[in-house]
Image (cartoon, helix red, strand yellow):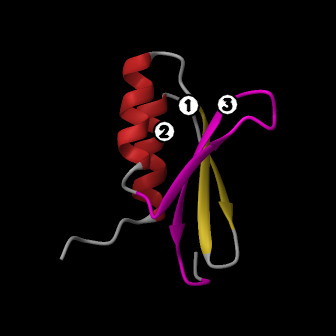
Amino acid sequence: MPARLTVESLRSAIEQAAGDVPTVSHRNGYVRIYVAAPAAPDAYRELLDVLLTADAWGSSDGTGQLRMWAALVTGGEA
């Protein structure tokens, strides 16, 4: 069985792939990590590869800028 992905390892991988500092949001039962979507196609693909390792992922452009996010279930513990 593979090791459980930690919030810090996912945050670090997202930062490295996107080339930008992500925002971490602790919620009830999960942690969500947001970052601006990179413009370069290679960086976008690298970020997507990282996001696919999370429990859930998606995107939002509600702020006028495309932001990608990944979530890890924590069971109420962050």
> Which quarter of the figure is the N terminus placed in?
bottom left
The residue that label 3 is drawn on is 66
The residue that label 2 is drawn on is 15
Asked where in the image residue 27 lies, by quadrant, the reply is bottom right
Pick the front one: 54 or 13: 54
CA distance separating discs 3 and 2: 16 Å
* Residue 61 part of the magenta segment: yes
Query: Which element is circle 1 on?
Result: loop
The residue under the point 46% across, 15% down is 40
| Residue found at the far right of this picture | 63
Asked where in the image residue 35 lies, by quadrant, the reply is top right
Instruction: Kindly report which numbered mark, 3 or 2, lies closer to the viewer in this rendering.
Output: 3
Q: Measured from the top left, where is residue 71 in percent x and y?
A: 54, 60
Q: Amino acid at mark 2?
A: Glu
Q: Amino acid at mark 3?
A: Leu
Disc number for residue 20: 1
Q: Measured from the top left, where is residue 33 in percent x and y?
A: 59, 52
Residue 22 position (above or below residue 46): below
Query: Which element is circle 2 on?
Result: helix
Find the magenta span and give its range.
54-76
